[in-house]
Image (cartoon, rainbow, N blue to C red):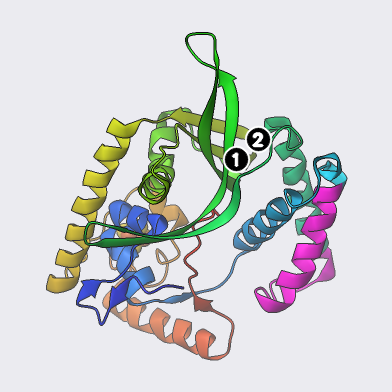
Amino acid sequence: MTSDTHERTTLATLSPSRASDFKQCPQMFKFKSIDKIPTEPTIYQARGTTAHLALERLFEKPPEQRTPETLYDLFREAWAELKTTEYPNLFDSVEKERAWGIESLGLLAGYFSIEDPTSFEPEALEMDLTVAIDDMTIRGILDRMERLTELGPDGKEREILVITDYKTGKAPPERYATKAFFALKIYALLIRTLQGSTPERIRLLYLDGPTEYTLDVNDAQLDAMHQQLTALWQAINKAIETDTWPTNTSALCDWCDFKNTVCPAFNTPAEIAKNRAAIDAAAAAGVARPGSDSVSGI
Ligand code: SF4
């Protein structure tokens, strides 16, 4: 993982997912990016990592081979690789691993009802982007980018640049969809900065549902994101400088790795000390690991 800080005095790089963390809760950002508190890998992370790898490899096949069966095989292959390298000991029985695999293949089946992978050719997959914008360095991995042809308002065909992010979880309710586009808008800004052309459409594909959220974006919106990112960068540097990390409790705390262990909003100092010692012991035993800086929507 690229460090988001340098000697804890200034921010060195920032990923869209970590920017999103800080927006949600500065204390959570600190736990992940500064303290790097190890967390136990979950079956949901494992599913996300494996599905992303399988979908990446699906587009390396010729279009006629991009079938559900190919994707299922690619998922099995990817899992065979990742279970030994990234997720050893995730399951304590073959039955649980099999049930997880069957559920995962069910989610992948949903992918084909969102889009037809034989109908287009991605321009890039799993783009590893490190982009300097003003005095900021933003780093992340974008799932996919393609150029699609569609009819413009004048009835003429036109080509648009589209960027896409896969999610293996459930889609948020539509009223919260705008927030979900935060990271993808940053990716659109990175692409514009790097390539000089503006992605006009950003897409979130939620395999669990399945659900597709699409948003058309323009330069004015990306300029606004640039300003927002600059303000976040400055706010994070200020937090580092003053070592001030407020908690921001919300319904999202239920999905936070730290709620029941070290978050001061939910635990006493004595509980935090005890839980932190247990986390460190688990890390030393190789059970937990520092959270990875995945921006692939796992
Ligand atoms: S549980 Fe909530 S308040 Fe605590 S660190 Fe996580 S997101 Fe922040």
Crowding at dot 1, Cα within 10 Å, few <14 / some 14-19 / many 20+, comes out as: many
Please state which amino acid type lies under the numbered disc 2: Pro
Q: Which mark is drawn over residue 10?
A: none
Q: Is residue 27 left or right of residue 102?
A: left
Q: Residues within 10 Å of mark 2 (few under 14, many from 20)?
A: many
Q: Is residue 232 magenta?
A: no
**Residue drawn at the location 29% of the way across and 71% of the way down:** 12
Dot 2 lies on which element?
loop
Q: Position of residue 15 (x, y in %)?
A: 39, 60
Q: Is residue 45 visible?
A: yes
Tell me if 3 is positioned left or right of 202 in this view: left
What's drawn in magenta, residue-wise? Answer: 70-97
The image shows residue 136 at horizontal and vertical percentages of 26, 61
- Measuring 52% from the left and 78% from the top, which residue is drawn there? 289
What secondary structure prevails in the magenta region? helix
Checking the image for residue 206, the label placed there is 1
Q: Which residue is mark 2?
A: 210
The residue furthest top is 154
- Look at label 1 and name its amino acid: Tyr
Asked if disc 2 and disc 1 are in contact, CB closer than 8 Å, the reply is: yes
Indicate the position of residue 4 as horizontal and vertical percent values.
34, 70
